[in-house]
Image (cartoon, rainbow, N blue to C red):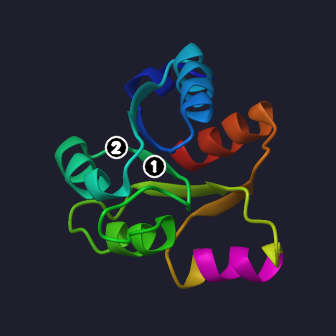
């Protein structure tokens, strides 16, 4: 990672506490600023306020309103002023990965889809590519 990573804010949205911890440590250790959230209903306000460079977004999230990561991704893409924000969906959903990846990138606006369990160096590499 370059020193530029210290200037980048990553907003991690994940409901699994262990995964959230691992991602926070992984990203912080290479110099990114990291904010975490586990509830879909609080993400939009957080993203609007913090304007992160990248959002790592799980799909299955707790929500009082029924909001999931797919809908959240689509809504985030509509926020004015955040057009350059990158979104990577990180999910264990494996069925039909090829068509699902295409749907997420073309219809929902995600920059990439990474299947769990992910390889940490590959995840960091992809984040670095998107933030370069």
When asked about the image quadrant of residue 104, the answer is bottom right
Q: What residue is pinned by disc 1?
A: 55
In the image, residue 79 lies in the stretch drawn in magenta: no
Q: What residue is pinned by disc 2?
A: 52
The reply to whether callout 2 and callout 1 are in contact (CB within 8 Å) is: yes
Query: In the rendered image of this protein, does residue 119 appear above or below residue 102?
Result: above
Provide the major secondary structure of the magenta segment: helix
**Label 2 CA crowd tier, 10 Å (few <14, some 14–19, many 20+):** many
**Label 1 CA crowd tier, 10 Å (few <14, some 14–19, many 20+):** many
Query: In the rendered image of this protein, does residue 19 appear above or below residue 30?
Result: below
Of 30 and 15, nearer the camera is: 15
Which circle marks residue 19 in the picture? none
Query: In the rendered image of this protein, does residue 40 appear above or below residue 50?
Result: below
**Magenta-tinted stretch:** 98-104
Query: Image check: 132 left or right of 114?
Result: left
Residue 6 in the image, given as x and y percentages of width and height: 44, 21
């Amino acid at each position: 990672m370059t020193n530029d990573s210290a200037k980048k804010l990553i907003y991690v949205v994940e409901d699994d506490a262990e995964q959230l911890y691992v991602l926070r440590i992984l990203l912080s250790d290479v110099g990114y600023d990291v904010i975490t959230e586990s509830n879909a209903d609080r993400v939009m306000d957080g993203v609007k306020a913090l304007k992160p460079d990248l959002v790592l977004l799980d799909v299955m999230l707790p929500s009082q309103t029924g909001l999931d990561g797919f809908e959240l991704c689509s809504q985030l893409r509509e926020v004015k002023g955040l057009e350059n924000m990158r979104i990577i969906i990180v999910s264990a959903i494996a069925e039909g990965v090829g068509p699902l990846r295409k749907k997420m990138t073309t219809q929902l606006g995600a920059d990439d889809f990474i299947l769990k369990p992910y390889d940490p160096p590959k995840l960091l590499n992809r984040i670095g590519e998107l933030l370069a």
